[in-house]
Image (tube, rainbow, N blue to C red):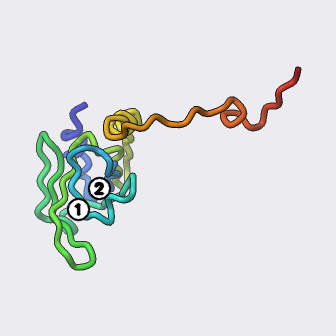
Amino acid sequence: MNKQPVFDWFWAQGDVLVTISTKTIGVDLPQFLREKEVVDFILGVDLTPRLQADDKGILVGMRFSGAPHTCFFPWDSVLRMECPNSVIQFRAGALNSQSALQSKEKPAPVSAKEKRPNLKLVK
C-alpha cells in the first residue's frame, strides 16, 4: 500500500502521530529507542519543520535529550497515523512478517490450555 498520500492528507490536517515498528528493516533511530518494539512520534510543522516524506518513507531531524539525530521511517514501518479528527491503522501482518524476517528462532508451541485457559478438558 502506498502510504505517502495518506500521510500527506494527515500532514495537511496538522500534527500527525505516527506509530513506528522499530524492528522493520531500514528504520533509523537512536539506540535506546530501538530496544522498544513500537514507538510513537508526533510530527508537525512546528515540531519537525525539516520533515521530508517521499516514496521511500519519512526523513526527519529530531532531538533526543538535546542530541540531534536524523531519523528515517520506511513506509513499511508505519503501523498507524492519527490526527485530531482521524485515525488509520495499517494491517498488523506487516509487522509480523518483518519480525519473522529478522528472527530466525521459531516460537515455542502453545498448548490448547494456554490458548483457551477458561476451558476444561472433560473425558
For mark 2, does the 10 Å Cα neighbourhood hold few (<14), some (14 to 19), or many (20 or more) residues? many
Residue in the foreground of this view, choosing between 118 and 8? 118
Answer whether labels 1 and 2 touch (C-beta < 8 Å): yes
Say whether residue 35 is left or right of residue 70: right
Q: Which residue is at 21% across, 55% downward?
A: 28
| CA distance separating discs 1 and 2 | 6 Å
Q: Which residue is at 30% across, 61% downward?
A: 42
Helix, strand or loop status at disc 1: loop
Say whether residue 121 is left or right of residue 104: right
Q: Which residue is mark 2?
A: 16
Residue 93 rendering spot, x and y as whole percentages = 40, 33
Q: State the mark number for residue 44.
A: 1
Q: Tell me the quarter of the image containing the C terminus.
A: top right
Outermost residue on the right side: it is: 123
Q: Amino acid at mark 1?
A: Gly
Helix, strand or loop status at disc 2: strand
Q: Quadrant of residue 43?
A: bottom left
